[in-house]
Amino acid sequence: MDAVTSHGGRFAGMTKKELIRAEQAIAHKYMGGVPWLMVAWGLGNFAIWLALWPLVMTGTLPLGVGFLIACANVTLCYLPSHEAQHDIIGRKGTKWRWLNELIGHVSLIPLVLPYRVARLTHYEHHKHTNDPNRDPDHGTKAKGPLDSIRRTILSQQPGSQSGLNNYGAVLQQMGREDVILDGAIYKLLFFGTLCALAWSGYALEAIFLWWLPRQFGLIYIIFFLSWAPHHPAEEKGRYRNTRSWRSKLGNIGSLGMQFHLIHHLYPTIPLTRHPAVYAEMKPILEARGCRLGDL
Amino acid sequence: MLLQILKTGFRFGPLLFGLLFIPPATAQILGALDWAPPLGLSPLAAGFALGGLWGLYAQIRGSWVSWTP
């Protein structure tokens, strides 16, 4: 007989097998369908970021306003692709597969992160969460919020071997040199575009619509998508490697990551359904000994 | 092959960024602030001086902002 839990309300006393069945029954109710909000978010966010360039270059929009919008664009650009990485918009062989792949590629352009790189390294993160040697995102482990920001800035330095700079090594270990090339081409296009803009008289636009928003976005994304939900990133195992917590910026301000625990348990549930899943599944998560914080 | 070429180029990334991006960016920032560079340098020359030195530092130290990467 499996161990019997003593916490978790009506689920207390259930065996582990009974708990997993109850958990899966809840999870399956929330899977499926196309998350159109994420589709609109991904395409709309990219379109807005693109539109900033002519608007600012023609003087229609002040650069300062463009900068603030671009920071929001880059910060928001990862999540639609994240849904695509998990085939949530359209699984292989379904009619919306092309849309899944389109969102996956396009939404990440402002972040200068190739979709295939993001997807493969993210799968490794799921497989080996918090493993110091095998989790590609373990470099985001930090003592606290300020340390997380400091470490992200340092991880962007040319000699750093952590953060995005570590993804090449991870892909090499996986034998995916073809995908490393994606990263190299993106990097070349990014810096090439910045230089071309600068020599054409648009250096300030290059800095404030792309380079600086990307730095800001990376700090924000890594803080909320990687550091906060896994902190202190020491425990492994399905029910302990991710936590839920109450963010001072709320669920939207924290990019929906208060409920990241649900994502690690059931990666194919769309982001926008996580709060409802969490509410329904919470007694089971308590019974399982998950790190639920004060949420 | 292409990957090797790109990797070789990226090995000099900080220096290239210092010489290809920072000079025009510095000149345009100085222009926007209406500041004149010191020592009678033109804005672009000042950018090359700044970008060259900073890029060299980043190239050697592996970081633009700290002593160690």
Image (tube, grey):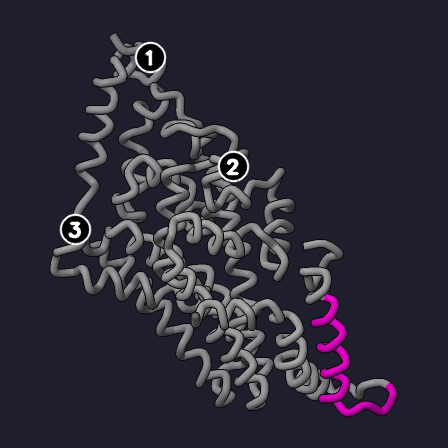
Left/right placement of residue A43 relative to residue A29 reads right
Q: Position of residue A220 (x, y in %)?
A: 52, 54
Q: Quadrant of the N terminus of chain A?
A: top left
Q: Nearer the viewer, mark 2 or mark 3?
A: 2
Query: The residue under label 3 is which amino acid type?
Result: Gly
Q: Which residues are magenta?
A: B39-57
Residue found 49% across the figure and 52% down from its top:
A169
Residue A80: name its quadrant: bottom left
Q: Position of residue A178 (x, y in %)?
A: 36, 62
Q: Position of residue B4 (x, y in %)?
A: 48, 68
Q: Position of residue A63 (x, y in %)?
A: 55, 79
Nearest the eye: A37 or A210 = A210
Are the residues under badges 1 and 3 in a single subunit?
yes
The disc at residue A132 is 2
* Residue extending furthest toward the front: B1
The disc at residue A33 is 3
Residue found 13% across the figure and 56% down from its top:
A93
Residue found 47% across the figure and 56% down from its top:
A168
Left/right placement of residue A97 relative to residue A124 reads left
Q: Looking at the image, is A10 positioned above or below residue B27? A: above
Residue found 39% across the figure and 73% down from its top:
A48
For disc 1, the marked residue is A5
Nearest the eye: A236 or A24 = A236
Q: Secondary structure at mark 3?
A: loop
